[in-house]
Image (tube, rainbow, N blue to C red):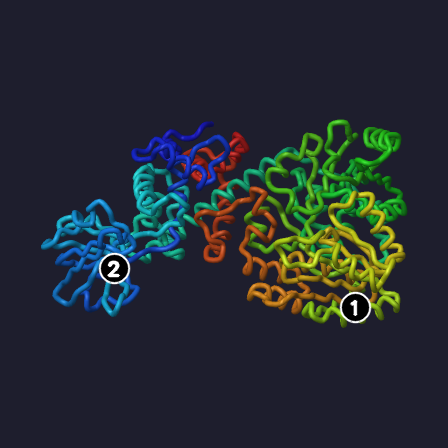
Amino acid sequence: MSRPETLQPLFASLHAIKGVGDKLAALLTRYFGAPEGQEAIVLDVLMHMPSGVVDRRRQVGIAEAYLNQVVTLRLHIDRHQPPPRGKPHIPHRVFAHDETGEISLVYFRAQGGWVEKALPVGEERYVSGQIGFFNGEKQITHPDYVVEPDKFGTLPLVEPVYPLTNGLSSRALAKLVRQAVDAVPDLPEWMAPETLANRKWPTFAAAMRTVHLPENPDDAQLWSPARQRLAYDEYLAGQITLQLVRSSMVSARGIARQFGDHLTSRVGAQLPFELTAGQQQALEEIFADLRAPERMSRLLQGDVGSGKTVVALMAMAAMAESGAQSTLMAPTELLASQHFRTIQPLCEGAGLTCALLTGKMPAAERRAILAGLADGSISIVVGTHALFQSDIQFKDLGLTVVDEQHRFGVHQRLALSDKGRHTDLLVMTATPIPRTLVLTHFGDMAVSVLREKPRGRQPIDTAVMSVGDYPRVVSRLQSRLAEGAQAYWVCPLVEESETLEVVSAEDRFAELQKVFGDQVALVHGRMSAAAKQDVMARFKANEIKLLAATTVIEVGVDVPNATIMIIEHAERFGLAQLHQLRGRVGRGSQRSACLLLYKDPLSETARARLDTIKSTEDGFEIAERDLELRGQGDVLGTRQSGMPGYRLAVPDVHRHLLEFAHDDAKALMQRNPGLTGPEGDAARALLYLFRKDLAIPLIRAG
């Protein structure tokens, strides 16, 4: 179904508006970030929210006008003092007065006589602007408005201020905004009447008018009813989209799997430890999903080291028992082979066939694995996203497990190719995601959370020190390595950068080599996969004692004997990253230590980050704090990946509205899954307004 006719005026190109020429149209298209090959439209202007308000309602005499205040004065114009000839840097001054005092109006580089025309001597004018002082006298430099007494009504007494870009004046934008607001059609209401009444909110159109053309400064505040209404609408559009993604994925006929606990208990018997209560509960939730006729779409959140892989393995064992195959996809070959090393011995002990498929394997080996997948003799295959390439045929793929969710957005979930289309989906993420973000990005998925660490894991001692203590750090490290410990030394960059005064991994490696000789090795992202794996294998085998590295080791490197993590320039890392890196140690039975080395001076935010990491190991607490310090786009590393960036909602202020929107969207989809009738039309209009039309084809008839 195409866009409703009533919305067309909002989708008109700005080019079509009177007074917008080619140059301005091109500028706006760039500024609003219109999609490739499209022009900016009226809706872009409407969604461009003011960042503040100028209040010109203060009408006083000159005597009560104070420094830096914005005031509106009724002035009698006395005389003009143009700059002397040949001295254009001297301003043009206009002297004026009212009953209470005198003031001058100052214009720089005012050629062409327009100032004299605007402010004729002997007449009265309303003048609005900010009061300044010069040589003890009050003045207004470049007044914002000058109007004749009978045109006072045209003066915007409460004026929104917008973020601008080079070449776009606030006047030009204000004009466009007025036209955009006038273009808003009568829209069907997508909120239930009683909800609207309870929250005392205006309609969408009225809210837009209030925020863009406020009658008093409070109208435009982030917490005003109008702005809350708009923030809620934006969240609601996102939540309905996620519910549609969910229903299209979940309803894609799943299969009710039948299995006992024959294989899962055999896998359990191989484990060197008991499952934690959290793992047990997650498994119960997953098994219930697998037995249900709908498709499973579940997010398994757990901090580093909380044992997600074991939960996934149990799910894959249950799937094998029901007669179907599973695939485990990791973002890199390094991680895929690591997962394989973790689960292979457990599978073997339980009598499950498990294979690793990588791009680098010999052709004969690859052919054998492909044959095993096609005839069903291989139950579990581990690899990267390349597992969904065309030459790979499964006999009966029942479960897809994806590791590291945040690189795997809504679009990827929808695009899991035909092979994975009807399979149950379990996504594992080691990034603890705060509830608000779970709602915004994964509201379409059910969530299981692993909060405890496996038994026997030791807490990690975290200390913060200045880089100035480098000699002390090195000598302490020497004695620890002599006792048999292994350590990581992480730097933010691979090689020296001209712009940043940061020690790179290569520099640090050279320094450490002077002390530790061939006990130290270097690993970074620009090395070939084979070279990286070779170094990692030697580190794991304890041939290397100290590993200098960049953040390539952030995810999934597992060396239980490594008990020391030194992070240099810790102030340059985000909280989530610091937390992930620290999670690389503390995996064995010995006490581990993490040392954060920083370089002065530290910013407030950097200090807050280091304090947070020092004071807690709870990934969820760290994630919530990260959200406060950074704002939500960064926490998932989604600034670049086309995740929803908000234009009307400001997460810090409007966070509570997300819960409303989530519940309302869910209720709507349960009530009216096909979005039919007037209520459905209203919801569709909402999706178009917030450019969520991608979701419209997902609405199923009935």
Residue 407 left/right relative to 141: right
Kindly tell me whether residue 262 is visible in this rendering.
no
Q: Is residue 2 above or below residue 653?
A: above
Residue found farthest to the left = 122
Q: Which mark is residue 474?
A: 1
Q: Residue 593: where, in percent of width, then height? A: 76, 67
Q: Amino acid at mark 2?
A: Ile
Identify the residue position indicated by label 2 in the image.
Answer: 140
Question: Picture quarter containing residue 332?
Answer: top right
- 578 w.r.t. 352: above or below: below
- Which residue appears at 88% of the width and 69% of the height? 483
Q: Amino acid at mark 1?
A: Val
Q: Element at badge 1?
A: helix
Where does residue 690 sit, x and y in percent of width and height? 45, 40
Residue 348: x and y in percent read 89, 45
Left or right of 437 in this view: 593:
right
* Mark 2 neighbour class, 10 Å CA radius: few under 14, some 14 to 19, many 20 or more: many
